[in-house]
Image (cartoon, rainbow, N blue to C red):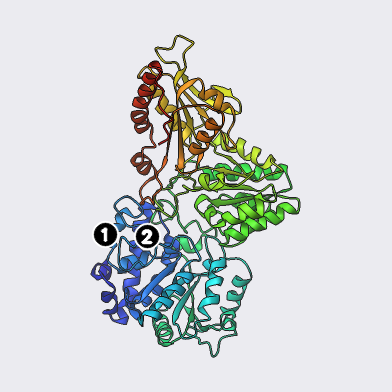
């Protein structure tokens, strides 16, 4: 690793001579490619900010000067320069370095900023706090041009510009991309500033910019890979006693040819890859790919189906649809709120929009789902990728709120497929709904093997039945297991383990979890205990909906719900986290079996307890 081995804190970077910096930059790139190729992670964004991060740490003094990264996936170099090299052998894995800034890791990480377009608002508040407290340390926000497509960035700029005597340094990392090429009028404005610009060009000679029109100082554009120019420019920005934008032009994936040359930007956040060729090591078909391929087929059959993405065309599986129907895909930038209301407009205009978004990012657009789509009973389908526990991306990326949040929305219907076949079926059913919004949620990673039903109960699939040893044919069975989405297969295995103890078990998949099928009530009457298992926070989700359904049907039935605890889960693999929180077959069987035995004993003694809802 050469010079990188000698870097343990920002002071070590500042002590180097200028002639040593290119060697350190090369060491960092070599280290990042080697480390991330093994674990996966955001390699492209970080290769593009090597020189920029070095310059930031040479000009500013973290943690006295606050460095904020938006989004935080471009902070790997920052982590290396602040003493966290050892954790990269387990990057995004349990016990290793987080993929985003983490206050628990270092005093140099101010915010855990993995949802884009927020750093400028943090910076505005921090600068106001420092001014009131008499602290003259600088607040520096590193913001990608992709993050500038989000509305919060402009709300924050409006306030930052009003503080003429409140210094905030906004470092605009302009690489022309978010996941994909940055779109919109602002991207065009930045592009117009780049051609022919000299490194270190100042506001006095640059074309008039939108930032200057807002009342902000502007410096640039500066070559984001020229360390000398970067340092000089950042020193100038630091000396100003007012808000300033430093426009740095960088190249995503700089120094690693496969990442530089890949037009589809598969190196934004890949899984494990070959460090020489860049070839992916992934082989299994993903849930995302199943969704994407089926939507292409639907699009070929129905000209009214259109798709929207918030700057995530490839990650959400819409690239194939865009290739087949380029005029029917709309990338709105990192602007989930706008995406949802724009979809509402498309639906009002007679089309059926499919909004493909990570489940965690739908949180940002709840008001628009509720008031702009559902209030008007519009046929918009939300395809919620990465639902449930996602694991390696850490607490902010777990899609553990959508089932609770969307339960509140009148008229909206939610589907949760258990496997690829059901994803295809339910997607088609969702886009066939013409009088209400729909949502379909599916997890991250390889798609589950198809699990066929052994029967039907109403619209629900019965996945397995095991008669209890003591059942003469007239008695109620012991437990009804309701497996939601990806938890259905886990429930089948748990049911087999419970049945091995001589207990009667029925496992069902509701398919549609809002509204619930009324047949659940009839089926519950045939059992002594109802168990709901879901890959979502337990509060207000499907388990609570089942309790309400049974209560409304005057069924006094013990119900036990299993789901994700209402806490922010640290990064680890999905399987590790599911095991930790008891959402695997073995844990479920160990917990449910004594509950069933207790419930059966109480039933035999005709001493039914109050409903158990834990």
Quick one: 575 or 531, which is closer to the camera?
531
Where residue 495 sits in the image (x, y, percent)?
A: 42, 25
Mark seen at residue 61: none
Q: Residue furthest left?
A: 6
Q: Residue furthest bottom?
A: 204
Question: At 31% across and 60% down in the image, what residue appears?
Answer: 104
Residue 22, placed above or below residue 88: below
Question: At 32% across and 78% down in the image, what residue appears?
Answer: 61
Residue for badge 2: 33
Answer with left or right where residue 86 lies relative to residue 574. left
Residue for badge 1: 86
Residue 10, placed above or below residue 373: below
- Label 2 sits on a secondary structure element that is helix
Quick one: 223 or 22, which is closer to the camera?
223
Q: Using the rendered view, name the quadrant where residue 152 is placed.
A: bottom right
Q: Using the rendered view, name the quadrant where residue 586 is placed.
A: top left
| For discs 2 and 1, the disc positioned in front in the rendered view | 1
- Circle 2 crowding by C-alpha within 10 Å: few under 14, some 14–19, many from 20: many
Residue 228, placed above or below residue 85: below
Which callout, 2 or 1, points at the residue further toward the start of the chain? 2
Question: At 71% across and 56% down in the image, what residue appears?
Answer: 345
- Label 1 sits on a secondary structure element that is helix
Where residue 217 sits in the image (x, y, percent)?
A: 51, 84
Per the model, the C-alpha gap separating discs 2 and 1 is 15 Å
Where residue 565 sits in the image (x, y, percent)?
A: 39, 44
Quick one: 597 or 603, which is closer to the camera?
603
| Residue 323 seen in render | no
| Residue 64 seen in render | yes
Residue 407, placed above or below residue 123: above
- Circle 1 crowding by C-alpha within 10 Å: few under 14, some 14–19, many from 20: few
- Quarter holding the C terminus is top left
């Amino acid at each position: 690793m050469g010079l990188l081995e000698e870097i343990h804190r920002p002071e070590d970077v500042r002590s180097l001579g200028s002639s040593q910096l290119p060697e350190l930059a090369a060491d960092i790139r070599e280290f990042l490619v080697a480390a991330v190729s093994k674990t996966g992670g955001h390699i492209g964004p970080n290769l593009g900010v090597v020189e920029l991060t070095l310059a930031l740490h040479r000009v500013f003094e973290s943690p006295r000067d606050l460095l904020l990264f938006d989004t935080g996936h471009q902070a790997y170099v920052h982590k290396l320069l602040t003493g966290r090299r050892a954790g990269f052998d387990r990057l995004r894995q349990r016990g290793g370095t987080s993929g985003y800034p983490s206050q628990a890791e270092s005093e140099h990480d101010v915010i855990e900023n993995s949802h884009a377009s927020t750093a400028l608002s943090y910076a505005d508040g921090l600068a106001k706090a420092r001014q009131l407290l008499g602290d003259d340390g600088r607040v520096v926000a590193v913001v990608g041009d992709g993050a500038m497509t989000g509305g919060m960035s402009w709300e924050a700029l409006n306030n930052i510009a009003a503080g003429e005597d409140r210094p905030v340094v906004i470092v605009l990392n302009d690489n022309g991309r978010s996941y994909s090429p940055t779109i919109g009028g602002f991207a065009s404005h930045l592009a117009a500033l780049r051609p022919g610009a000299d490194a270190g060009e100042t506001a006095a000679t640059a074309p008039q910019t939108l930032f200057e029109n807002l009342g902000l100082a502007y410096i640039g554009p500066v070559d984001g890979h020229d360390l000398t120019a970067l340092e000089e420019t950042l020193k100038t920005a630091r000396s100003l006693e007012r808000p300033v934008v430093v426009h740095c032009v960088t190249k995503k994936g700089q120094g690693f040819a496969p990442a530089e040359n890949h037009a589809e930007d598969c190196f934004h956040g890949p899984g494990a890859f070959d460090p020489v060729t860049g070839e992916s090591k992934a082989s299994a078909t993903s849930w995302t790919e199943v969704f994407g391929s089926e939507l292409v087929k639907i699009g070929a059959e129905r000209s009214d189906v259109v798709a929207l993405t918030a700057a995530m065309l490839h990650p959400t599986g819409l690239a194939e649809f865009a290739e087949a129907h380029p005029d029917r895909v709309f990338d709105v930038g990192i602007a989930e709120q706008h995406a949802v209301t724009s979809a509402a407009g498309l639906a009002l205009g007679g089309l059926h929009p499919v909004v493909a978004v990570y489940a965690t990012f739908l949180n940002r657009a709840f008001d628009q789902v509720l008031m702009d789509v559902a209030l008007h009973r519009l046929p918009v389908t939300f395809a919620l990728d990465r639902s449930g526990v996602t694991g390696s991306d850490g607490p902010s990326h777990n899609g553990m709120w959508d089932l609770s949040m969307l339960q509140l929305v009148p008229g909206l219907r939610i589907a949760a497929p258990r496997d690829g076949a059901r994803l295809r079926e339910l997607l088609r059913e969702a886009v066939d709904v013409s009088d209400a919004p729909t949502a379909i949620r599916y997890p991250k990673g390889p798609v589950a093997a198809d699990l066929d039903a052994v029967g039907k109960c109403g619209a629900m699939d019965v996945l397995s039945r095991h008669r209890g040893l003591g059942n003469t044919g007239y008695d109620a069975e012991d437990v009804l297991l309701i497996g939601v989405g990806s938890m259905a297969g886990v429930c089948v295995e748990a049911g087999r383990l419970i049945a091995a103890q001589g207990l009667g078990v029925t496992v069902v998949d509701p398919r549609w979890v809002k509204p619930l099928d009324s047949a659940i009530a009839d089926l519950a009457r045939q059992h002594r205990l109802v168990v709901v298992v879901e890959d979502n926070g337990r509060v207000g989700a499907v388990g609570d909906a089942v309790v309400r359904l049974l209560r409304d049907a005057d069924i006094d039935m013990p119900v036990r719900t299993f789901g994700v605890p209402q806490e922010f889960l640290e990064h680890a693999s999905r399987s590790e986290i599911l095991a930790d929180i008891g959402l695997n077959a073995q844990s479920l069987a160990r917990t449910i079996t004594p509950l069933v035995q207790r419930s059966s004993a109480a039933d035999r003694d005709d001493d039914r307890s109050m409903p158990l809802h834990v």
